[in-house]
């Protein structure tokens, strides 16, 4: 639920050209990007290093100027507006806390700059510290806080000024795995409870999946796909997106026909998949995309690809079984391992998939 101050964000055909200092050539860090974030929505920009996601964030903050195109916050064109006039707030990867100020002073700094009366600042700071679980630490210096606590202070400092748009630049990358998990939940809870429009940048697919209303997957300065976490995971547009957002196996196939499903043949066996790339036609070479939870293991010769079990990783509610095949190492997720057969390491097996959980994609793996 968006609050009354939340605003939409619109990118209209935004391009950012940098001059490469070594070659002297112009390089498009972002090329013709257009999208809209609805009020109160959290969008994550996801992609490998150098894909342009941080440049997009910096252009929204005003720290970078687009070469062409238009950026709107609500009904206001902010393309050429300086950062301090945009009503945005940034949470950085490095917490950026002032070491000479205590927690309370750090959190209230933005309100002090805005000339808010001191008594109001004190009440509001305490309220936001309670919100991020640091109500008893107002007088502590940042040096006496853990990494997770420092990031909570940085988050409270950004939220307290009630920005129209909250920007988060890989804010959890300096935390250990458990803290990252806790802070993902915290950020999601705070963003939704306050109804703030937010843009989040990460190369961590788990962060993107668990935090986002929608995800923008980028590559080489372009948007490859935009959708909900479920859409991106279950219905990727190509093999790049499929591989970037989760573990996956690709089984080479040939398209035999397309009607209400995509009918494919793998090693003489035919299957019907409910999802397929709209670029495919009958007779095309393609690949069946299968996630670990869609795969199963059986006796040699019974499935679509034979292999040898190389490792079993027990995770409590599931076992991850790795199978070495001619297609590479394939991960199979076996849920409820107490009632399922777990194949021993070294055993010869065969892999099958549930066609209903797959998608047929253009075979562009060699071009990646």
Image: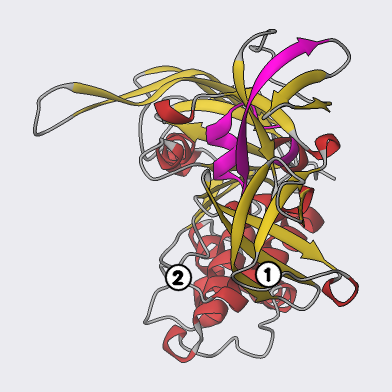
The answer to whether one can see residue 121 in this image is no
The image position of residue 156, as x and y in percent, is 61, 67
What range of the chain is rendered magenta? 233-258
- Which residue is pictured at 68% across the width and 69% down the height? 120
The answer to whether one can see residue 81 in this image is yes
- Which residue is pictured at 46% across the width and 88% down the height? 141
Single out the residue that lies furthest toward the front.
Answer: 301
Would residue 78 be counted in the magenta stretch? no
> Which of 80 and 251 lies nearest the eye of the viewer?
251
Residue 138: image quadrant is bottom right
Q: Secondary structure at mark 1?
A: helix
Q: Image quadrant for the C terminus?
A: top left
Residue 267 is marked as none
The image position of residue 362, as x and y in percent, is 59, 21
For residue 141, side relative to residue 254 (left or right): left
Residue 120 is marked as 1
For residue 70, side relative to residue 65 (left or right): right
The image position of residue 65, as x and y in percent, is 36, 29
Q: Secondary structure at mark 2?
A: loop
> Which of 102 and 23 lies nearest the eye of the viewer?
23
- Which residue is pictured at 45% across the width and 44% down the height? 84
For label 2, count other residues whose C-alpha is less than 10 Å away and answer few (under 14), some (14-19) or many (20+). some
**Spatial separation of the CA atoms under disc 2 and disc 1:** 33 Å
Q: Earlier in the sequence, mark 2 or mark 1?
A: 1
According to the image, label 2 marks what residue?
174
> Which of 214 and 275 lies nearest the eye of the viewer?
275
Look at the picture and state if 330 lies above or below 107: above
> Which of 135 and 324 lies nearest the eye of the viewer?
324
């Amino acid at each position: 639920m968006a609050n009354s101050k939340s605003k939409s964000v619109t990118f209209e055909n935004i391009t950012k050209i940098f001059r490469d200092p070594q070659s002297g050539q112009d390089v498009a860090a972002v090329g013709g990007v257009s999208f809209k974030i609805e009020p109160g929505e959290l969008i994550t920009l996801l992609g490998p290093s150098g894909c342009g996601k941080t440049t997009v964030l910096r252009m929204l903050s005003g720290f970078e100027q687009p070469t062409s195109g238009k950026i709107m916050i609500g009904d206001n064109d902010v393309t050429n507006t300086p950062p301090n006039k945009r009503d945005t707030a940034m949470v950085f990867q490095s917490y950026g806390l002032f070491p000479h100020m205590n927690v309370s002073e750090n959190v209230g700094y933005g309100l002090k700059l805005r000339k808010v009366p001191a008594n109001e600042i004190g009440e509001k700071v305490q309220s936001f510290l309670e919100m991020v679980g640091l109500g008893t630490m107002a007088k502590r210096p940042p040096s006496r806080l853990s990494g997770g606590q420092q990031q909570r202070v940085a988050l409270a400092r950004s939220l307290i000024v009630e920005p129209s748009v909250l920007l988060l630049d890989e804010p959890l990358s300096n935390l250990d795995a458990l803290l990252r998990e806790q802070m993902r939940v915290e950020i999601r809870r705070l963003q939704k409870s306050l109804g703030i429009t937010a843009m989040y940048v990460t190369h961590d697919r788990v962060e993107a999946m668990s935090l986002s209303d929608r995800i923008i997957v980028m590559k080489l300065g372009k948007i490859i796909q935009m959708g909900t976490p479920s859409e991106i995971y279950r219905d990727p547009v190509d093999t790049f997106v499929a591989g970037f957002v989760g573990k996956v196996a690709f089984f080479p196939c040939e398209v035999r026909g397309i009607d209400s499903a995509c009918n494919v043949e793998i090693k003489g066996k035919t299957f019907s998949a409910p999802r397929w790339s709209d670029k495919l036609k009958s007779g095309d070479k393609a690949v069946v995309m299968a996630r670990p939870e869609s795969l199963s293991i059986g006796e040699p010769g019974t499935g679509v690809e034979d292999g040898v079990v190389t490792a079993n990783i027990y995770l409590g509610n599931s076992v991850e079984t790795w199978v070495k095949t001619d297609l590479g190492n394939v991960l199979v997720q076996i849920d409820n391992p107490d009632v399922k057969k777990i194949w021993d390491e070294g055993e010869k097996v065969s892999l099958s998939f549930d066609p209903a959980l797959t998608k047929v994609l253009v075979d562009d793996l060699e071009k990646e």
